Amino acid sequence: GMGGVGKTTLAQKIYNEQGIREKFQVHIWLCISQNYTETSLLKQAIRMAGGICDQLETKTELLPLLVDTIRGKSVLLVLDDVWKSDVWIDLLRLPFLRGLNSHILVTSRNLDVLVEMHATYTHKVNKMNDYDGLEPLMKMSLGPYEQRREFSGVGYQIVKKCDGLPLALKV
């Protein structure tokens, strides 16, 4: 889905949901910027999995440590805002596929990235309709219910200008 539609927010809700947290021993959240470095991602994954990697600096040193750190554990890995599939295909796939119980959640603006990553399920996040957008706008902006009715016309105009994007409504 497009930027601001709520992909990261939905992924955060899943990642932080108590029932999900209890099913996995290790929880790793990696935000994949457009110009990430492999070593910084590997270090972050190792740290979030409970490992220590302060003295290691190269991909060759870090990959085996990541494998050892997650070996035999159930892992939830979130790859947030993936722009290119190479982060999974060339870097993270082998360590996490070697794990006994790894589940990967990916957010991306580009469906082709998910196809290249061989996603088994894709959930498209759509824009909100005007009615669904009005409710959170009014809750965030106004107090008592009576006041909400008074400003609903202006609220609808704001929702239309935000084009159904939750992030725009929040701002």
Image: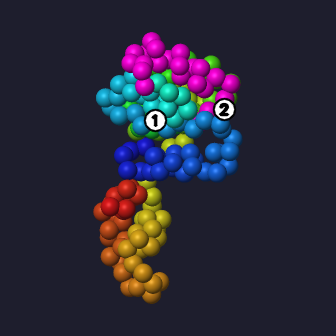
Question: Residue 115's spot in the image, x, y percent?
Answer: 50, 27
Q: Distance between the residues labelled 1 and 2?
A: 17 Å
Question: Residue 14's spot in the image, x, y percent?
Answer: 57, 47
Q: What element carries label 2?
A: strand
Identify which amino acid the numbered label 2 is placed on.
Ser
Outermost front residue: 55
In screen coordinates, is 164 left or right of 70? left
Instruction: Determine whether 50 is above or below 7 in the image.
Output: above
Residue 30 image label: 1
Question: Residue 150's spot in the image, x, y percent?
Answer: 38, 85
Q: What's the residue at 64%, 23% (across, down)?
A: 71
Outermost top residue: 60
Mark yes or no: residue 126 visible: no
In reply to whether residue 65 is colored magenta, the answer given is: yes
- In front here: 170 or 2? 170
Where are the magenta residues, as a range? 54-76
In reply to whether residue 129 is colored magenta, the answer given is: no
Q: What's the residue at 31%, 29% (across, down)?
A: 35
- In front here: 49 or 89? 49
Residue 74 image label: 2
Identify which amino acid the numbered label 1 is placed on.
Leu
